[in-house]
Image (tube, grey):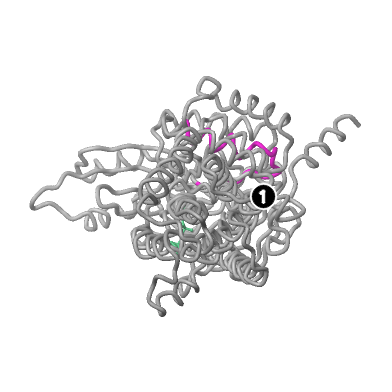
């Protein structure tokens, strides 16, 4: 009887998760332990980066720019204009860093994903947990960014900043799922340097983070309007300046959400193809 | 525990496993012996429910991997051919996170980790980084990891390939202990001594097919003689070729195999063979009489050696 009981306990111990979310939750300890190894470096850079940006772009560069609300989408100073742009751009660059080389490492170099999927965990659970970690990284870096900039008086309201914070998570997700999908199917890491140079850098520079896209040629402005970062920047800026156009809010949120969702299905498909043969 | 009928695996046009039948019973230790490329890993990955089958039937613990992959994986332990340890985590953390993947409570995992570190003799290395471990230690850690969920079946794909002889013996010793505890073990290997030591029953695999099945002893009895006389001849410029020599002594045993460096004469009395060889005025530079092994069985069945 006691022995039978023990056998039952053991079997009850190891189980298949009841859902993708429950499966992903089992990966929490893995990501927490992996993060503990690197957090110091990333914590310092996520604090210093916004300070350098604010100093260089906002204060020094901004000193040359007249704070004309009609030419700065309603901002009364260049710093107030550029702050939301920098936060959104930071959300994006954090994602690029987290879902390119690290994803390839999990598949190809240290193969940690293969350890995970040899257990009851499924590919969607593995993707979800990794994206959860990426969101955590986006959340912490952007929260620090917002806090560092708050004393410079660039935010119109507290509610606006809090909402802007959640928007960064949405921006993060909208970039994370499709780029994850791209990385998951990639055989060779040499494409990543192109992704950074021809993908991330132009987005970073021309999506309205640092100057209004109305300064661009009309066709370039139209192109910029099609990019996810512009939607993210514009939404963030509306919130931090407290100048909301609700129909545009809806467009931005819908755009980012659809991108995140489509990317999710693509990511799961690409990783499954890669892992299951 | 494991039942396969006409099991197949294709990669595109290439068929790695061409229809095999396997039965593994509770408590036994079962082996797949075969050279590189025989299809052993492809088979193991299907059994581990990480690779979909291309044809035939496969049941693991009574479940179909196509429908119940996660439930099957919850109850088996897997030691893949290539280590998938996280080299940047410590030994202990590797075991700990892996235990969590099975849904075990944190406290339970911690207790099991200590127990398993002890079992694979890595307690002193618990806080070392995996990248600093030797090959044998990594293999033992992978074995410990595969035991964290107290599996009903343990799958080991080439558990000692690439290890030096001493490290191999440590691994064998641990596996032997598990076998004595009644754990069902399925292993693949291309070392005949490993198969002989660890397997109650095995199949010999070649080019995606099973060519023989039985216990090591019955396989040797059925497909080989009791003893083998190995003869090495020096290379004399005007001397006979191996083939010619083989013909001269063909009647001395049941069978003569010609290898690049020696002749094998299969007979129930090896000493007798050697005496007769000398009687015929032939002068091998080295002779050796030994018992038949699974290597001889493989040579007999496929005409090739296991390890090239
Ligand atoms: N993912 C794969 N894609 C294509 N061919 C493969 C794949 N995995 C194995 N093979 C081929 O299948 C054959 C059997 O391989 P494998 O099962 O690894 O043999 P073993 O483990 O007995 O050495 C080999 O010829 C190998 O090249
Ligand atoms: Mg293999």
- Is A107 displayed left or right of B98 in the figure? left
Position of residue A168 measured from the top left corner of the image (x, y, whole percent): 58, 54
Residue A131 drawn in magenta: no
Q: Secondary structure at mark 1?
A: helix
Camera-nearest residue between A270 and B197:
A270
Residue B209 in view, yes or no: no
Position of residue B7 measured from the top left corner of the image (x, y, whole percent): 61, 66
Q: Residue furthest left?
A: B237
Position of residue B262 measured from the top left corner of the image (x, y, whole percent): 27, 47
Compared to residue B220, the image places residue B172 above or below, namely above
Camera-nearest residue between B16 and B285:
B16
Residue B147 drawn in magenta: yes
Residue A264: quarter of image: bottom right
Q: Residue furthest bottom?
A: A219
Name the chain under label 1: A
- The magenta segment is B137-157
- Is B209 displayed left or right of A216 in the figure? right
Give the image quadrant in which the ligand numbered 1 is located.
bottom left
Residue A119 in view, yes or no: yes
Residue B22: quarter of image: bottom right
For label 1, the residue is A24
């Amino acid at each position: 009887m006691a022995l039978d009981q023990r056998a039952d306990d053991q079997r009850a111990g190891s189980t298949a998760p009841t859902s993708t979310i429950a499966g992903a939750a089992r990966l929490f300890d893995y990501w927490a332990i992996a993060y503990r190894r690197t957090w110091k470096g990333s914590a310092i850079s996520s604090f210093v980066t916004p300070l350098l940006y604010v100093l260089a772009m906002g204060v020094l560069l901004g000193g040359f720019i007249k704070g004309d609300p009609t030419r700065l989408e309603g901002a009364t100073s260049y710093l107030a204009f550029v702050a939301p742009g920098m936060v959104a751009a930071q959300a994006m660059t954090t994602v690029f860093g987290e879902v390119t080389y690290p994803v390839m490492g999990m598949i190809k170099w240290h193969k940690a994903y293969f350890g995970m999927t040899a257990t009851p965990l499924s590919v969607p659970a593995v993707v979800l947990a990794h994206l959860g970690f990426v969101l955590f990284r986006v959340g912490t870096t952007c929260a620090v960014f917002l806090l560092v900039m708050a004393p410079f008086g660039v935010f119109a309201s507290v509610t606006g900043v809090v909402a802007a914070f959640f928007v960064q998570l949405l921006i993060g997700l909208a970039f994370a799922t499709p780029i994850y999908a791209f990385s998951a199917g990639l055989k060779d890491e040499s494409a990543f340097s192109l992704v950074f140079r021809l993908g991330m850098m132009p987005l970073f520079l021309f999506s309205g983070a640092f100057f209004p896209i109305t300064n661009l040629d009309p066709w370039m402005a139209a192109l910029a309007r099609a990019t996810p970062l512009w939607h993210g920047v514009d939404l963030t800026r509306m919130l931090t300046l407290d100048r909301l156009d609700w129909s545009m809010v809806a467009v931005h949120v819908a755009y980012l959400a659809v991108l995140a969702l489509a990317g999710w299905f693509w990511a799961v498909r690409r990783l499954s193809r890669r892992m299951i043969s | 525990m494991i039942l396969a009928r006409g099991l197949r695996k294709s990669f595109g046009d290439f068929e790695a496993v061409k229809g095999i039948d396997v039965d593994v019973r509770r408590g036994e230790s079962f082996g797949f012996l075969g050279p590189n490329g025989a299809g052993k890993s492809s088979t193991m990955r299907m059994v581990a429910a990480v690779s979909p089958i291309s044809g035939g039937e496969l049941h693991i613990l009574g479940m179909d991997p196509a429908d119940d992959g996660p439930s099957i994986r919850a109850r088996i332990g897997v030691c893949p051919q290539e280590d998938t340890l996280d080299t940047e985590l410590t030994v202990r953390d590797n075991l700990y996170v892996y235990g969590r993947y099975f849904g075990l409570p944190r406290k339970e995992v911690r207790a099991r980790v200590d127990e398993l570190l002890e079992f694979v003799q890595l307690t002193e290395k618990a806080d070392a980084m995996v990248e600093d471990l030797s090959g044998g230690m990594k293999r033992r850690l992978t074995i410990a990891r595969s035991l964290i969920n107290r599996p009903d079946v343990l799958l080991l794909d080439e558990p000692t390939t690439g290890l030096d002889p001493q490290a191999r013996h440590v691994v064998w010793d641990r596996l032997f202990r598990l076998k004595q505890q009644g754990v069902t073990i399925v292993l693949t290997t291309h070392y005949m001594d490993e198969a002989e030591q660890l397997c109650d029953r095995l199949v010999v695999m070649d080019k995606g097919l099973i060519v023989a099945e039985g216990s090591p002893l019955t396989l040797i009895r059925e497909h080989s003689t009791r003893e083998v006389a190995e003869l090495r001849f020096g290379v004399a410029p005007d001397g006979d070729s191996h083939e010619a020599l083989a013909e001269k002594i063909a009647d001395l045993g049941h069978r003569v195999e010609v290898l690049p460096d020696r002749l094998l004469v299969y007979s129930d009395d090896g000493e007798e063979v050697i005496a007769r060889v000398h009687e015929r005025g032939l002068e091998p530079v080295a002779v050796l009489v030994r018992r038949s092994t699974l290597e001889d069985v493989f040579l007999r069945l496929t005409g090739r050696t296991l390890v090239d």
